[in-house]
Image (cartoon, rainbow, N blue to C red):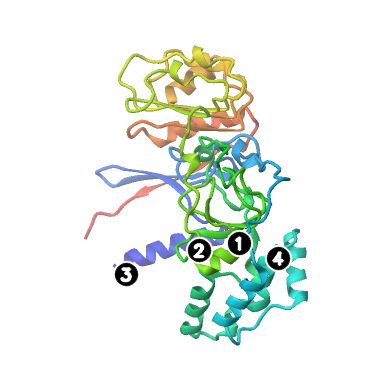
Amino acid sequence: MQDKRDAVERVLSALEDAGMDGVSFVAEISPAGRAVLYLLDTGPSVDAGIALHRDSLILVEGSVPEPWRRLPDPVPEAMPAPSADLALLQRTLEERLDGAIGATEAEIAAAEERLGIALPDELKVLYRVTRAQREDWDGDIVRAERLYKAVGCDLFQLDDVYVADAASRPCPWQFAATEAVSTPPDAAVQGVVGSPGWIAFGDNGGGDRIAVDLTPGPRGHMGQIIMLSHEKSIGAYVLADSLTDFVAGRGGQVDGDHHRTELPAVARVNVRSLTSVEAAVHPALEVLSIGVWEGEPLSLAPVTGLPRLRTLTAQPGTLADPLEIAALTGLEFLKLGPEEWRVLLDAGAVPRSLSAAAIEVPGHLHPLPIADLANEILALWDRPPITRTVLEGELAPDA
């Protein structure tokens, strides 16, 4: 066991010296002990940079999927909830947190300057009562729990409050590209990834962020309290109409997951969902995903010319003619099997509108040909290739 730990430490030390978090590799070992080790450096051209069959190729540096570029709609008519009561909020917090140290006006002003946005009045009242700095209770767990119960969440200190915009909610390209922004007319919260009006000030203790919402949905209130789930990359839930209600424990979850309805923006054709590409056709279609399919290969002709189609993913063998993809001129993300990519590359028909791409690897194909295929795609955009270092040697037989 010590020999194994020593070997691992040598690898970890080498990665640290190179400034790398990890490395992809392929090992070929013969029964006789001949070993060939291929170290793959995916560099900046692969989204996560660990496994080609799971990650996306970044064709345009710094690009993000369309939902991550969407800002919330203006809400000039939005008003605070009638329940917002600064005096009641202050009185309630002072009763629960007697003796707490509050933030100074200078500290609040510094936070606003850092964030680039004025804090809403209810949030200012909260921090004037308690600045929530950990050193104020010096490891006293009882006092920490008291703060949690008093506010209703794990309150951030002012220096940790942040604007929960889209950039604060990163997501790998191949998953983010299959999302779509949707805000129904009856939604209390907008179905965006993030907003310059979402001010995150706490956590529920399970990784879900609690924020004040200054850009509510059509049925929402200015200053409502929302939760950004760590299990989702888009949208939020309304927890209370105001911070006053939230601290008082009134409201609960008052807004359902409106984002759950995918059609018509997102369509999934497979053995359990839509049974044809024709059924997905709609002027609002943004994402078409073709999954496990047992019938004849499908034609993409029905979706040709749709104005908003930006993402296509298709399992290997599900397309009747991959060259039909060339007519989908608005694609920004494309995920196909190796054979389908081969058809497009050989015909010079890879859509140049793409910002990212992915290879759907069926079964257990050898990774090195997949890396070569990826480099062909990257070369079309003059992106840095995936490089490899080959180490060869003999493994001594077990003693």
User: Which residue is the site of mark 2?
Assistant: 250
Amino acid at the residue labelled 1: Ser
User: Which residue is the site of mark 1?
Assistant: 83
Q: Which residue is at 77% across, 64% downward? A: 113
Amino acid at the residue labelled 3: Gln
Q: Which residue is at 48% across, 74% downward? A: 149
| Real-space Cα separation, disc 3 to disc 4, in angstroms | 59 Å
Q: Are marks 2 and 1 in contact (CB under 8 Å)?
A: yes
User: Which residue is the site of mark 4?
Assistant: 121
Foreground pick, 272 / 167: 272
Measured as percent of width and height from the top left, residue 375 is found at 54, 32
**Is 387 rendered above or below residue 264?**
below
Q: Are marks 4 and 1 in contact (CB under 8 Å)?
A: no
Amino acid at the residue labelled 2: Arg
For marks 3 and 4, give the one nearer the viewer: 4
Amino acid at the residue labelled 4: Asp
Foreground pick, 166 / 389: 166
Quarter of the image with the N terminus in it: bottom left
User: Which residue is the site of mark 3?
Assistant: 2
Is residue 148 shown to the viewer in this render? Answer: yes
First along the sequence among labels 3 and 4? 3
First along the sequence among labels 3 and 2? 3
For marks 1 and 3, give the one nearer the viewer: 1
| Real-space Cα separation, disc 3 to disc 2, in angstroms | 57 Å
Measured as percent of width and height from the top left, residue 252 is found at 47, 58
- Outermost left residue: 399
**Is 1 rendered above or below residue 221?**
below
